[in-house]
Image: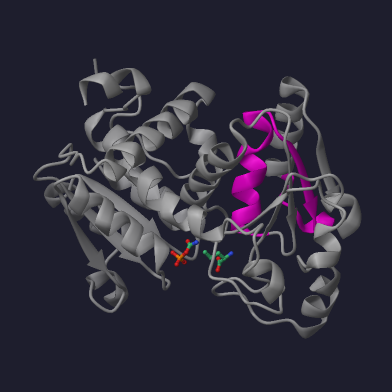
Amino acid sequence: MKHSLLGRDLLALADFSDTELLDILESAAELKSRQKRQKPQSLLTGRSLAMIFEKPSTRTRVGFEVAMTQLGGHAVYLSPRDTQLGRGETTADTARVLSRMCDGIMARVYDHQTLIDLAAAADVPVINGLSDRLHPVQALADLLTVREHFGSWRGLKLAYLGDSNNVSNSLLEVINRMGMDFALGTPTPQAVDASLLAAAQATAARTSTRLLITADPLEAARDADILYTDVWTSMGQAVDAAYLESLQPFQINAELLAVARPGAKVMHCLPMHRGEEISAEVADGPRSVVFDQAENRLHTHKAVLIATMAGVVLSRAQRLAA
Ligand code: CP
Ligand code: NVA
C-alpha cells in the first residue's frame, strides 16, 4: 500500500502528522544505513526533480541532487538567471510546465508565498528548500542527528540562540512535538512569529514539554543538552549594526557551553561564521556535530523524495529483506 505522503507537498513541518514525521525519520535512518552498506536504492529510477533556487546554496543543492542520483533519478538545477521566471513568466505557469515534465519540485525562495503559489498550481509534490519563513528539510536532518547522538528525543532540552529566523521557526514547529523541551534565546522575543508560537505552546501543553522564549541567553542555555545557532544575518536580510551588537551575548562559546549539561552537543545548520554566532573554539571543538547535520541532509532528503514522489517509506523491519 502506498504511504499517505504520496503526492504531498512539504512546505512546513506542520504539513506532516506526527506519525508521518516519525516515518520519514525512520526511513532516513534506514536509507543512511543502506548507503553505508553500499546497497543502492533505485527507488526513483527515471524520475526527475526540478530544483528552483532564488538564493545560493551548498547543502540543499548538493543534498537534493546527489539524493536523486543515488536513487536512480535526475535533478535539474534552475537559477533565476536560467529560467523564464526571471523574465516575468508567472510562478503558476512555471509550476504547470514543470509538472508536465518532472515528478517533483524543490524550491528555495525569498517569499514563502512563492512556495504556496507553486504548490497551488503544481500537480507534483513541492518541497520547501528554505524560504524567508521556514526551513523544514533542515529541521528533519537536525532531528535525525539528535537521535543518533542521544538515542532518542524525549526528555532532552534543545536551546536555539541568536537571530529568530527561518531555521528557528522550523525548530519551533517541531521540537516540542518530538518530546523535547525548547528554549529560544533571542534579543527580540517579541519578533517571534505569533502563529508559530501559539501552535508551539499548544504542542508543549499536549506533549507535557517546556517552551521558553527569552532575551536571556544564559537562561536559554542552562541545562541544555543541545545548543543550536545560525547566522545573524540571513540571505536577503539587510545588515543592521545595532541588532548585530545586541546578538553578541548569544554567541555560542565556552562560557555559554559551561551552563549547558556536561556533554552537551553544539549544532549549526551551516554555513557558519566563526567569531560571530559561534566561537571558532566551539565550532571546531569536540562538542560540535555540525557536519553530521550536514550529511544527514542527504539522507533525510532521500526519505522525503521517496515518500512524496513514490509513496515509499522504509523501516527497520524491511532491513532483513534489504
Ligand atoms: N543549511 C543549508 O540549508 O545550507 P545551504 O544554504 O548551503 O543549502
Ligand atoms: N537563516 C539562514 C539559513 C541558511 C541555511 C538564511 O536564511 O540565510
Residue 94 position within the rendered picture, expressed as x and y whole percent measured from the top left: 25, 59
315 is within the stretch colored magenta: no
Q: Is residue 125 left or right of residue 12?
A: left
Task: Report which quarter residue 152 is drawn in.
Answer: top right
Q: Is residue 294 left or right of residue 9?
A: right
Render colour scheme: one colour
Q: Residue furthest bottom?
A: 241
Residue 149 position within the rendered picture, expressed as x and y whole percent measured from the top left: 58, 42
| In this view, 65 is above or below 170 | below
Q: Residue furthest top?
A: 1
Of 313 and 291, nearer the camera is 291
The structure residue drawn at horizontal position 51% and vertical position 53%, both measured from the top left corner, is 293
Ligand 2: quadrant of the figure: bottom right
Residue 121 position within the rendered picture, expressed as x and y whole percent measured from the top left: 30, 46
Give the magenta part as a residue range.
165-194
Of 289 and 160, nearer the camera is 289
191 is within the stretch colored magenta: yes
Residue 112 position within the rendered picture, expressed as x and y whole percent measured from the top left: 50, 56
Q: Is residue 108 left or right of residue 228?
A: left
The structure residue drawn at horizontal position 24% and vertical position 66%, both measured from the top left corner, is 77
| In this view, 90 is above or below 26 | below
Query: In this orientation, does residue 109 appear?
Result: yes
Task: Report which quarter residue 174 is drawn in.
Answer: top right
| In this view, 124 is above or below 93 | above
Query: In this orientation, does residue 188 appear?
Result: no
